[in-house]
Image: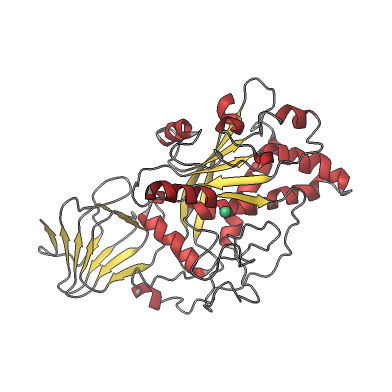
Amino acid sequence: MNKFLILCMVFMCSACTTQTIGIVQPQAAATPTKNTSPLDSKLSSTATIDNFTITNHLTPITLNVNVIILTNDQKKHSNFDWNNAEEKSLVQDYFEKINEVWSHFYQPDNLTGCYTGTDFYNDSKIRFKFNYITYEDATAWNYKNSGANIEKKNYSGISPYEGWYLKNLDQKFSNDPSIPKGILVYLTMDGENFDRFASNNAKGYNIAGVEASQFPTTTNLTRTSSIHIPNRYLKYLYHRYQLTTEYKTNWQETRKWHVNDAVGSAHEFGHTMGLEHSNQYHKANQCKYALMSQTGSDPRNYLQPTEILKAHKNLRESNLIQFVTENSFLGNTFLIPQHTTWTKTQRFYSNLKVADNVTLTIKEPIIMAPQAKITFGKNAKIIFEKNGKITYPNGKEFTGYVNKSTDTIIKN
Ligand SMILES: [Zn+2]
């Protein structure tokens, strides 16, 4: 029963009305504030996992993302056409905007009600590498086959979870060795209203911009993570052909509005990273600067440092570890300062240093970046028990030990 309730809460929480219909004006470009983290260089090199802070010199972690452009073979044009240079570049710019959001946060003038700390990270040090796939599947293309009806605010079916209407595609793309394992983003359509809007370039388009995504899991590290973005192509027609007339402007201008809608998708990526509309500093939607606010008219160009660190924790401990590129490496070092036992799989994008006289006991597989080193302090030890081992992302045994001697690694 508990499990069911949790699922429902997640379900409700992750279906987001990310923007209202109409224009979303690009935000005025403020000057990004420099990273003001107090621990900027040497200190952080000996931080523990719990004291981790983001510093400017870290190299971002990159996650693979497969954007699935679903099409309907019964129609000549049913979604963005990858052979159409303009539509292709629009889709690419739209998704790259998500990287811009996650790498250029702005420090709000006033954090009242948002956060009590004085630290600020302008860059999450998290990036997304988009891989685009056009896939013909008329049933999947029409999200109304999920039971959802956005016009009637019936969002049941729209949110990705292990049993949703695209579960078979989740498995198919996840198991396809020809594409990188990544977060799955589906571009779907309202199949019932598609012809009506597509035939007149989205005149009278009025479907709310609802998107939905799936929180990460720490209990099933092989689970998929999906994001659902309906009707983006119809919105493109609307921006291109209707708003240009309505606002007496041109596509060059409304194209920016379209790309700016990607702030809503950047919010969905926040859910994928494990972030919610609320956190320990405020209730849902109470910080208008936060990317995780649901109000489309809010600035939404900021994330609390604690939220960014939450995302990094999930990149180490959740099913997100599957989607990170093989050579992602932050470049910092985590100190293991006291006797420690790891009973769960973790993936690190950092070096490790086991402090003098400290024993690190490892009971489940640990994954280290190819560039990483594990340094032993004086009389430091690693003990492997149960399923414990350390590998690279490709599964090969980790060899990057420094100061290893004959009795520093013990296999029980
Ligand atoms: Zn949301």
Specify the quadrant that holds the C terminus.
bottom left
Instruction: Report whether 318 appears left or right of 256.
Output: left
Against 352, residue 206 (above or below) is above
At 39% from the left and 78% from the top, the residue drawn is 43
Q: Position of residue 57 (x, y in %)?
A: 47, 68
Q: Nearer the viewer, residue 311 or 41?
A: 311
Q: Nearer the viewer, residue 217 or 28?
A: 217
Residue 223, quarter of the rendered image: top left
> Which residue lies most toward the right here?
248
Residue 68, quarter of the rendered image: top right
At 76% from the left and 38% from the top, the residue drawn is 237
Against 167, residue 120 (above or below) is below
Q: Nearer the viewer, residue 44 or 305?
A: 305
Instruction: Report whether 96 appears left or right of 249.
Output: left
Residue 329 visible, this angle: no
Total numbered circles = 0
Q: Quadrant of ligand 1?
A: bottom right
Against 42, residue 125 (above or below) is above
> Which residue lies most toward the front here?
1
Q: Position of residue 331 (x, y in %)?
A: 39, 64
At 63% from the left and 66% from the top, the residue drawn is 289
Q: Position of residue 30 (x, y in %)?
A: 70, 68
